[in-house]
Amino acid sequence: MTKDVSESPHALVAFGANLPFQNQQPLETIKAAIEHFSFEKITVLACSAFYRTPCFPSGAGPDYINGCIKLEMKMESTAASILETLHRIEANFGRQRDQRWGGRSLDLDLLALGDQILPDLECYLCWQDLTLQQQKITAPSELILPHPRLHERSFVLVPLADIAPDWRHPVRKRSVVQMLGDLLPAEVGAVLAGKLID
């Protein structure tokens, strides 16, 4: 089967928040941010359930509200333009980029854009293989896709399975459901236990 070249890839985006913004609690901020995509002329095709999860790394702050969305992108959209839009929305909701892994009023992470690997496979593999200690002190100066940590984070994979269970990681060659199955059941169960009934 040939791929329809006219079909624009979907963007998969993780969201999270654990600090209030103005008079809004994190869940309210996230809902408002999702609605804000319409002002950017971007269609939200699907939104996962919302999950309350412990701050990562453990003890770094209040619990997060996490989830994922699938976005319909315009044909002319690039990974860089999508990232710029995400940063603009974050800024509208008080995001401060002054501490790695610090608390935040809104966090929007571009997880994947179709099957793109950016900037290239060699660079992706370097970032994927960083130790936890290296991750704490090192941040890439350019966009890495897919997100190099998504396959090991239950708070990303659980909500991602809500909206894109069959999306296949272009490097690891495993679907979201398969990657979720690679994690410890206790890790997955902890996220599922925090599912919010809204």
Image: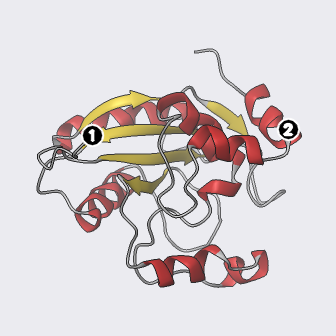
- The percent position of residue 36, horizontal first and vertical second, equals 29, 38
Q: Helix, strand, or loop for circle 2?
A: helix
- The percent position of residue 158, horizontal first and vertical second, equals 64, 37
Mark count: 2
- The percent position of residue 132, horizontal first and vertical second, equals 76, 74
Q: Residues within 10 Å of mark 2 (few under 14, many from 20)?
A: few
- Report whether 46 appears left or right of 180: left
Q: Residue at x 12, y 51 (%)?
A: 75
User: In the displayed structure, would residue 83 be above or below residue 157?
Assistant: below
Residue beneath label 1, please? 37
* Contact flag, marks 1 and 2 (Cβ < 8 Å): no
* Image quadrant assignment for residue 20: top right
- The percent position of residue 118, horizontal first and vertical second, equals 38, 73
- Report whether 27 appears left or right of 6: right
Q: Helix, strand, or loop for circle 1?
A: helix
158 or 117: nearer the eye?
117
Residue beneath label 2, please? 185
Circle 1 or circle 2, nearest the eye: 2
